């Protein structure tokens, strides 16, 4: 089967011809038709989980995918051949991932039936980023009437975080530089958009909204970047949540702010919830870049360069 893999940590991802895995008891084989690309994918290729989890090499990259159940092993219930499924398929110890024609899964994995009527590419764009956005908004206890700043709003996580926060009745301020992206953010529910390339975001925000915001959902900044946002956060009582793990919650608590270093935990149940929201038209996951599987290395580079506008997806 064709797959994009690395021979070792730090090696360039390349197209390889690898054996199709055989489903054992409790496992099923999925014929993947699309893979979603996330920043986590290149971080894993560089060894972010080295020493934490065993990795099999060559290591096929990718977590998010969508496809059709091809065959099921002994004892599998709830999944059957021909069923369209989507979810997270990274199995590092086996060297398996979603940038591949086939992958193994079990009923305990984060895999669920695909949203009705959705294309494989659309479904593959959802799992990691949208589950993270859902969990982040929940962890930050975003509520009706609160003012919420989303920093990194135009990326895979951000586009969904804006929608979930607005759906909860919050007044959302999003970051976006390009006028087209600013209009897109407003369509997703943002009340105001700040061009983060025009100056310090906190200053620009306080110019129009001197009372500041209750919550910051920060998807991109390092510790220094977050520190520059703090003057715009209510205290006491404000909340800052980061996907980058850069906060010092004890220090923030001393300043009257709740700090959350968010770690996403996906589940099949959450995938089912997202599928329902998508089917009901309450959640839109925008794909801005589609490429063929063989083009995965350049798609990863593009993401790494920070040019994401929504999601990147590979056609398999
Ligand atoms: N902790 C967790 O559990 C968890 C879960 C999911 C994701 N993450 C992490 O969260 C981050 C975001 O993920 P993603 O999938 O959304 O990434 P992405 O799709 O690559 O999006 C990043 C977005 O942020 C924008 N951006 C970059 N720097 C910015 C700045 N200083 N101010 C405002 N916007 C900025 C980029 O646009 P411009 O280039 O125009 O600025 C881009 O649209 C990644 O680091 C990912 O690894 C963590």
Image: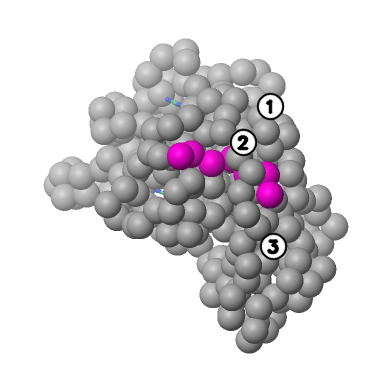
Residue at 71% x, 47% y: name it: 34
Residue 139 visible in this rendered orientation of the protein: yes
- Whether disc 1's CB lies below 8 Å from ligand 1 is answered no
State the residue in front, 47 or 39: 47
Q: Which mark is residue 183?
A: 1
Verify whether residue 103 appears in magenta. Answer: no
Please provide percent x and percent y for residue 172: 54, 40
Query: Callout 2: few (<14), some (14-19), or many (20+) C-alpha neighbours within 10 Å?
Result: some
Quarter where residue 157 is shown? top right
Residue at 65% x, 58% y: name it: 20
Q: Nearer the viewer, mark 3 or mark 1?
A: 3
In the visual, does 180 lie left or right of 133? right
Residue 264 visible in this rendered orientation of the protein: no
State the residue in front, 87 or 260: 87
Q: Secondary structure at mark 3?
A: strand
Please provide percent x and percent y for residue 251: 15, 44
Q: Which mark is residue 15?
A: 2
State the residue position of label 3.
30
């Amino acid at each position: 089967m064709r797959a994009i893999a690395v021979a070792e940590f730090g090696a360039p991802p390349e197209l390889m011809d690898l054996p199709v895995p055989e489903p054992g008891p409790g496992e099923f084989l999925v014929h993947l038709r699309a893979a979603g690309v996330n920043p986590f994918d290149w971080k894993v290729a560089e060894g972010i989980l080295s020493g934490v989890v065993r990795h099999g090499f060559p290591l096929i990259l990718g977590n998010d995918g969508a496809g059709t159940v091809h065959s099921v092993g002994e004892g599998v219930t709830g999944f059957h051949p021909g069923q369209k499924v989507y979810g997270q398929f990274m199995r590092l110890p086996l060297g398996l991932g979603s940038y591949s024609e086939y992958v193994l899964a079990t009923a305990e994995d984060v895999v669920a039936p695909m949203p009705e009527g959705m294309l494989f590419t659309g479904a593959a764009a959802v799992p990691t980023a949208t589950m993270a956005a859902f969990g982040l908004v929940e962890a930050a206890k975003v509520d009706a009437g609160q003012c919420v700043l989303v920093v990194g709003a135009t990326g895979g996580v951000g586009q969904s975080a804006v929608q979930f926060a607005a759906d909860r009745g919050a007044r959302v301020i999003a970051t976006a530089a390009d006028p087209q992206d600013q209009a897109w953010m407003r369509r997703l529910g943002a009340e105001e958009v700040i061009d983060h390339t025009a100056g310090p975001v906190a200053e620009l925000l306080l110019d129009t909204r001197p009372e500041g915001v209750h919550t910051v959902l920060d998807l991109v900044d390092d510790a220094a970047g977050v520190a520059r946002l703090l003057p715009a956060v209510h205290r006491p009582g404000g909340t800052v949540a980061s996907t980058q793990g850069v906060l010092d919650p004890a220090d923030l608590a001393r300043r009257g702010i709740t700090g959350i270093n968010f770690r996403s935990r996906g589940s099949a149940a959450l995938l089912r919830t997202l599928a329902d929201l998508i089917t009901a038209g309450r959640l839109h996951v925008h794909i801005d870049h589609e490429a063929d599987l063989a083009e995965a290395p350049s798609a990863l580079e593009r993401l790494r360069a920070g040019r994401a506008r929504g999601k990147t997806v590979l056609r398999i």
